[in-house]
Image (cartoon, helix red, strand yellow):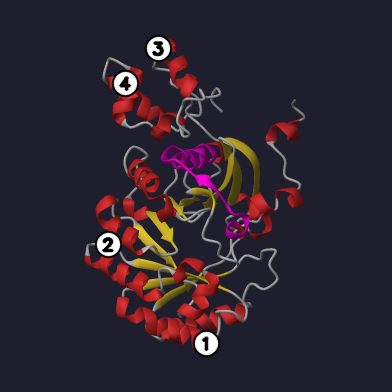
Amino acid sequence: MSAHPDVSAPPGGLLDLDDAALGELVGPPHYRVAQVKRWLYERAVASAHDMTDLPAELRTRLDRIGAAPLTEVARTSADDGATHKWLFESRGASFETVLIRYPDRATVCVSSQAGCAQACPFCATGQSGFERQLSAGEIVAQVLAAARELRAIDDGRSPTRVSNVVFMGMGEPLANYPAVVSAVAKLCGPVGLSARHVTVSTIGIPDRIRQMTTDMAPVTLAVSLHAPDDALRDRLVPPNRRWPIREVLAAVADHRAAGGRRVTFEYTLMDGVNDSTDQAHALAALLRPLRPVHVNAIPMNATADPAFRPSPAAACRSFVDTLVAGGVNATLRRNRGASIDAACGQLFAGRARLGLRRPDEESGAA
């Protein structure tokens, strides 16, 4: 961690500064801005004092604002070290980040808000309520924290660099639109990610979906649908009462026509709620006109609400097979990190139950 930032510093510290603001802070010579950005975004340093080719006075000045604005409250891992989850805190708000390691890629799932105001009843984040928006710097800081973790692990089981970022953590990204646009620009700019490896997931805010094609790099759009009809989606995704399915899908069609990439639809399978064969047929009929699309189906992660349970394996398989037979590409995803509450909102909600403590508490430090 860097030194405590000044109270006047932005929430994301140096990561919230654009080139003009960074240039004003750093001062001449002009090449210092490029040096600082390399340290921040490419090397992911946690303290300006690690920027060894900068003058000591400048490093001290930068560290007063902070290079790593997040405080690690708790962390845990699962899948034999392939899945790591953090509960971070920044300016009094808590939010979660997940690193999922595969042999060919390393994916970071970031939060865009502390909490969520959408109130989806099957989602642990939706049950916890909304705290505040995250800044672009706080979003990017989650990716850089995972990048430092990857370098520290370096066990040959995954790349040592972040290759994919998904906005599928806590919050509704398109309800924090300016910060997400700025964060995507940083991720696809100085951080060095390809836009095709960045996914922005939304419950479906039509105007923002249409704006994405002009305001963002060509990232992948993922729409959290969860139901094939408005009656059920009104219950599962309350904003559907404002933006019904037909309006969301019309915006998706416009996004595609304006040059957007193939759209993914997220569908959380809940036992006896949205996982029947008839519902799979209805979903296929709904999405066929938008082809090519892809459905990611995944059994829900259990929450405290007994009204929602994960669908059995056989029902999940039958649902996906029905979609494919109906002409819609679909994949049944495997839950990763279920033993550590890796779904968004679950580590925060279950911290006391899991016995997780801050790292300084675990070490016995004051």
Give the residue type that dot 2 points to. Answer: Gly
User: Is 320 above or below relative to 345?
Assistant: below
User: In this rendering, does residue 228 appear at all?
Assistant: no
Residue 152 point in image, percent of width and height: 55, 36
Q: Residue furthest bottom?
A: 278
Q: Quadrant of residue 287?
A: bottom left
Q: Nearer the viewer, residue 360 or 130?
A: 130
Question: How packed is label 4: few (under 14 Cα within 10 Å), some, or many (20 or more)?
Answer: few
Residue 245 visible to the viewer: yes
Q: Quadrant of the N terminus?
A: top right
> Badge 2: how crowded within 10 Å, few (<14), some, or many (20+)?
many
Helix, strand or loop: magenta stretch: helix
Q: Secondary structure at mark 3?
A: loop
Residue behind mark 2 = 260
Task: Name the quadrant containing residue 270.
Answer: bottom right
Spatial CA distance of label 2 from label 3 is 44 Å
The residue under the point 61% across, 77% down is 313
Give the mark nearer the N terminus: 3 vs 1.
3
Residue 243 lies in the magenta stretch = no
The alpha-carbon separation of the residues under discs 2 and 1 comes to: 31 Å
Which numbered circle lies on residue 24? 4
Alpha carbons under labels 3 and 1: distance apart = 66 Å
Residue extending furthest toward the left: 258
Residue to which mark 1 is pinned: 277
Q: Which mark is residue 3?
A: none
Image position of 354 (left or right of 171): right
| Image quarter hosting the C terminus | top right
Which residues are drawn in magenta? 125-150
Q: Tell which of 188 and 208 is nearer to you.
A: 208
| Rendered location of residue 95, percent (x, y) | 57, 46
